[in-house]
Amino acid sequence: MNDVKITVYIPSHNYGKYLEEAIESVLRQSEKDWELLLIDDGSTDNTPEIMAFYQSDPRIRLFHTNGIGLQGVANLALIEARGRYIMRLDGDDYLDENALLVLGKNLDYHPEATLVFPDYYLVDEKGIIISLERRERLYENNHMIDLPANGACSLVRTDLLRDVGGYRTDVDAQDGLDLWLKMCRNHRCMNINLPLFYYRRHGNNLTEKTYRIYDARRYIKRHSIKSELEGYRPIIAVIPCRRNYDFQLDLWNYRLNGATLLDRAIKMSIASDLFDEIVVASDNKDVTETMDRYDDQRLSFFQRLPEETIRSRSIAKTLDRIADKIDPQRKGVSALNYIQAPFKSTFGLEEAVFTLILNSADTSIAVNEVEQTVYLRTATGMRAVNPPSNLNSDFNTVYIETNATLATLNRILKRGMLIGPSVVNYVLPDSESFFIRSERDIRIAKALVEIEETESQRKSLDMARNVIS
């Protein structure tokens, strides 16, 4: 039974350096109807000693777990919570003194809302403010819910979070995305344009563990749309090739340490069970010699018209003709797998489809965030499109398309469009975004493959050593 208004839980795994500030920020809250769960998850620093200072406060309960991870800790807190609402506060972050009051009142006044989150200050290791991170108001200024809120400092209805099964424990990162999809795909979420917590950026927190986050994000997306996939069949992977108009003839046949660019794209595609059809589209039938090396019933050749391969012509016409043959009712999705992006993973290719379906969009594109300042020439000189600022918003972030892949609804192609009116994006890691446009890029790609193979050999040697030992 819920006998307090808000449960806050603070997990700590070796965050003793910051933990007191996090706890004290809860004690200072203007909202007084709360409880605090302090959970030490196998720390080897002074976390237990810091928590012990607060054990006599009747509003605070202490728990000790043995390295069960963030999701395990979150589910423990969900079991133990007595509050109508629940919030995670990480051990290295801290709250504004009015955070619980403002967020709690918003859930009180809006019974249709299941989750509410605020803006926040990004601070450095010493607590010095770096920037104000702002999110435009959902359903008012911002009608897309493709960008999840921070998993920490979002206030959620406890009973509803229990009803959807709590936190998934089969991933060890990106609980913010997991929580967001469970709460906001079928329910209303809210945000408050007040900075009500301080999010600390330092070298040891999860934000820096980039590849764990990418892997977890893709896994969560795949499992979140599993039940919806049938409504988007057939899902077609298209590998476009051409004889001319690249910096060298038949670029698809260029070999990187033994494997052609087309080989790499085919292997990447057939490694996925997501695709119903895998189509190599080319104006040169010589590609079939490469295709013959693969025994996969989904793999087929499609004859491109030479006039459809010129650089100024959209590939939408080719995709439209492929869809006429495979998906005449236009219920499915086509995903482009460009041979010029040889380092993207199978998961990166699949993510284009997952992202499209999750957001009920027309098109999803792979992007990178632009961190450098970009300028636009005007009548009076250069104007920065994304000037440096200590106020960041989801509306002033600039992205660049990677060209590595995109996914689009087949019905959009019927209109001659490659990219539909509703476009969402997902961020590819830098290692998967490399795109070959020149001879110089080829030389870089060769070096990257050598590094890739050396790293693979090193990992194999390490595994062999572990077995021997």
Image (cartoon, rainbow, N blue to C red):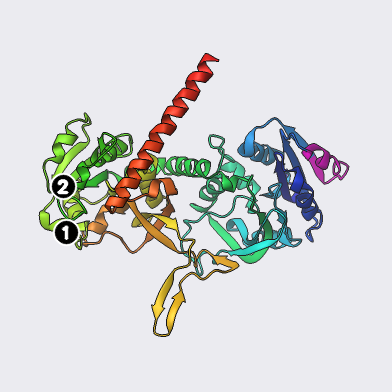
Residue at 58% x, 58% y: name it. 112
Q: Which residue is outermost to the bottom?
A: 380
Q: Earlier in the sequence, mark 1 or mark 2?
A: 2
Q: CA distance from mark 1 to mark 2?
A: 12 Å
Q: Compared to 247, does 384 lie above or below?
A: below
Residue lying farthest to the top in this orientation? 468
**Whether residue 356 is visible:** yes
Horizontal arrangement in the rendering, residue 398 relative to residue 332 (left or right): right
Give the vertical position of 72 relative to 97 (above or below): above
Q: Is residue 436 visible?
A: no
Q: Nearer the viewer, residue 310 or 302?
A: 310
Above or below, comparing residue 30 to residue 21 in the picture = below
Say which of 291 and 277 sits in front: 291
Which x, y percent locates residue 407?
32, 51
Indicate the quadrant where residue 347 lies.
Answer: top left
| Part of the protein shown in magenta | 46-61
Give, as a three-letter code, the residue at label 1.
Ile
Q: Secondary structure at mark 2?
A: strand
Image-based side of 455 in relation to 249, left or right: right
The residue to which callout 1 is attached is 310
Residue 225 part of the magenta segment = no
In depth, the one of 308 and 264 nearer the eye is 264
Residue 106 image-quadrant placement: bottom right
Asked if marks 1 and 2 touch (Cβ < 8 Å), the reply is no
Indicate the secondary structure of the residue bearing disc 1: loop
Residue at label 2? 282
Q: Position of residue 457 (x, y in %)?
A: 42, 28
